Amino acid sequence: MDPVDRLMAEHRVIEKAIAILEKIVGEYESSGEIDTGDVESLIDFIRTFADKCHHGKEEGVLFPKMIERGIPKEGGPIGVMLDEHEQGRDAVRRMSKGISMIKGGESGGRDLFIKAAWDYITLLRGHIDKEDNILFPMAREVMTPSDIDEMDNEFDRVEREDIGEGVHEKYEALIHRLSGKYLGEVSHHHIH
């Protein structure tokens, strides 16, 4: 699978996580019930799979290669994507703080969590759409066959060294389990 396809496949897993988060927030708003453990698992997924692994590949491998091939960083789509990655990290920090406050019975935790979660959901949906439809096609246009091989190897290295063996599988299994619980999906195959 070529590197851009790999990133798009990861987007599909991240979208599933966002759909689960949306369901959790909606239920929390209407019933006041929330499984903080599930949210902590999702935050862990976002931080490791979506940010460190997926955004790590974009920021460490794809974007530098695009810049090398003449696509401007500042004022272009790459600058916007980097900015959105930072906004996403900020929303996740706020979500995490909100969950800690909820668990500690502190007032304000609920509102902090709900606002941050909606910020993240809205941001990431638009972000993925822009990458899939604008940035990635642009990347494909400027990549040489050797760029593609090189990026493929770099992606393998990021997964091996920065993330560790078996982590992808662990997170796909988590999203699979939470999909069953929150989205009523009883499929028995992995997300690919």
Image (cartoon, rainbow, N blue to C red):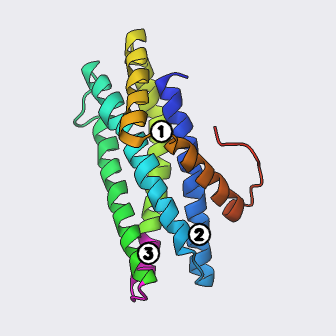
Q: Secondary structure at mark 2?
A: helix
Compared with residue 183, is residue 145 higher up or lower down, i.e. above or below?
Answer: above
Q: Position of residue 70 (x, y in %)?
A: 26, 20
Please give the residue where the numbered disc 2 appears in the rendered image.
24
Please give the residue where the numbered disc 1 appears in the rendered image.
165
Answer few, some or many: residues within 10 Å of disc 2's Cα (few below 14, many 20 plus, some between 14 and 19).
many
Q: Quadrant of residue 19?
A: bottom right
Which region of the structure is painted magenta?
104-115
Which residue corresponds to the image point at 33% horizontal and 29% vertical from the top-left?
Answer: 61
Please give the residue where the numbered disc 3 appears in the rendered image.
99
- Marks 3 and 2 sit apart, C-alpha to C-alpha, by 12 Å
Q: Quadrant of residue 159?
A: top left
Which residue corresponds to the image point at 44% horizontal and 59% vertical from the top-left?
Answer: 120
Compared with residue 119, is residue 50 higher up or lower down, i.e. above or below?
Answer: above
Which residue corresponds to the image point at 64% horizontal and 60% vertical from the top-left?
Answer: 178
Task: Point out the tag, 3 or 1, that comes first from the N-terminus.
Answer: 3
Q: Is residue 108 magenta?
A: yes
Residue type at numbered disc 2: Ile
